[in-house]
Image (cartoon, helix red, strand yellow):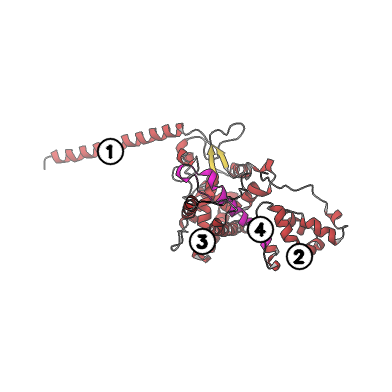
Amino acid sequence: MEPTKVTSGPAIKCHLLLDLPDDILIVICSQCRIDELLDLRLTNSRIRNIISEYMLTIAPSVARVTFPYSDRLLKPFADRTRYTFEWLKGLIPQQLAAILVDRHRIVSTGSLSHYGIPAEDPFGDELRARVANGWHVLRSLSNISREVHRRYEVVLYTDCELDTLIQKEQIILDKRLQYMKTLPDQLANDYKLMFRLLWTCFGTDLSDTGEDEPWISDRGDALSNLGIEDLLLMRDENVGGRWMSRRGSLLLTWFVLAEGPEMFWRQWWSLPSGSSQNHIRDLARSTFRELPPTLMNRHRCFAQSFKAANPIRGLVSTSPIPYFAEYTLQRENDDSPSLVKDIMTHVPFRVNFKVQPMKPLVVEIGYQFAEFHNLWLRMVIMTLASFGSARLCPT
C-alpha cells in the first residue's frame, strides 16, 4: 500500500478529557501525533503530569503513529530510558532530513538522476545526521527572529514603523552572526550543507495558471524586479527549473531564516494532504505581499550580509554530491542490491512559484546589453578621437 499522510481525527474538548481515568488518558495520549501531544501537554497540569510520568510508554507509540512507515527512524532502543520527550521532539528534524535527502531524486535530471538516498537505506545515515544538525541550526536562527520581535515590540518604539522594523532586523542579523560564531566548524558546515540541499525544493512553474499570482519579485520591468545580482531566478531547463539561489541574497533566504523548519514540517508531513501542497508558497506570497519595497530591499541586504559573514570553515565538505555519488557507485557495483522500501513518494516536496515566461526577459536583457554595448563603443570612439585630435594639435 502506498504511504499516505496520517491526519488527526476530531478534536476532543479538554473538559471531557479531565473526566476520564488515567489509564484511558494514557491510551488517548499514545494515539496522538507529535504535534497533537505537544498541544495536549499544554492544556492542563494533570494531563501534562500523566504524559511526563508515562513517557516511556507514550513516546514510542506517538512516534509510530506520526511516522507509520519510518522503520529506520524508529529503530527500537535496547535502553528504554532513551524514550524521552526530547527524543520525541528530535524526531522532527531527523524526519525532515530523511525527506530532504530522499526527495532530492525528484529534482535532479540528466547525469544527476540517481542522486538522492532513500530514507530507509542505511547508507544515508551519515548524510541524514548532518542534515538533521543543519535543521537544528536553522531552528535556532529562526527562534532568534521570534525572540527579537517579541522582546523589542515596545522597547524599539519610533514615530516611523518602517524604521522600527529595520532596527529589529538589524538586531536579528547581529544576534544571528554572533550565534554562528559560537558554532563548531562541523556544525556550521552541516548547516550550509542542509541549506544547499534545501534550495532544491524551490522551483518555478510556467504552467501554474489560474488565480495564482506571479512571485512577488517577478512583476513589471524584468531587470529591475528580477534583480540579476540579488534575485537569481533564472529558469534553467538543465536543472529542471530549480532556482540557482545559493548566493544567499534572495528574499526567500530571509523568509526561510525567519520561518525556520516549521513550514517545511507542515507542508511535508503534519498538515492534511489536501491543504499542504502549496503551504510554503502561499505563506511566502502572503508575507511579501504586505512588505513595502524599501523593506524588501533591506531584507535582501540582511540576508546577503548573513551569507557573506559565514564562509565555509575548515576542510569539512558542505556538498552532498560526494555522498550521492558514492551511493550511486555502490549500487551500480552491487551484483545483488537489496530492495529498499520507498516511503516518501507521497510527500509534497516541491515549492513551485508561478513566474512569467522567460522570453521577454531574454529579449529585455538583449536590448539592455545592446544599448550598453553601443554606449561603450561610442565612448571608446570618442576617447580615441580625442587622443587623435590631441596628437594633431600644434605644440
- Mark 3 or mark 1, which is nearer to you? 3
Label 1 vs 2, first from the N-terminus: 2
Q: What is the CA distance from the residue labelled 4 to the residue labelled 1? A: 69 Å
**Residue corresponding to mark 2:** 52
Mark 3 and 1 residues: CB-CB less than 8 Å, in contact? no
Q: What secondary structure is found at the residue carrying circle 1? A: helix
Residue at the disc numbered 4 = 74
**Does the rendering let one see residue 260?**
no
| Nearest to the observer: residue 158 or residue 301 | 301
Q: Position of residue 291 (x, y in %)?
A: 58, 44
Residue 254, percent from left and from top: 55, 50
Q: Quadrant of the C terminus?
A: top left
Q: Residue at x 45, y 32 (%)?
A: 359
Q: Which segment did they paint magenta?
A: 87-116
Q: Main secondary structure of the magenta part?
A: helix
Query: How busy is the neighbourhood of tag 4: few (under 14 within 10 Å), some, or many (20 plus)?
Result: some
Instruction: Of the two numbered discs 2 and 4 on the same chain, state the one appearing first in sequence.
Output: 2
Mark toward the viewer: 2 or 4: 4
Amino acid type shown at disc 3: Ala
Position of residue 232 in the picture relative to residue 378 (left or right): right
Q: Amino acid at mark 1?
A: Met
The residue type indicated by label 2 comes to Ser
Judging by the rendered image, the residue that carries numbered circle 3 is 188
Mark-to-mark CA distance, 2 and 3: 33 Å
Q: Which residue is mark 1?
A: 379
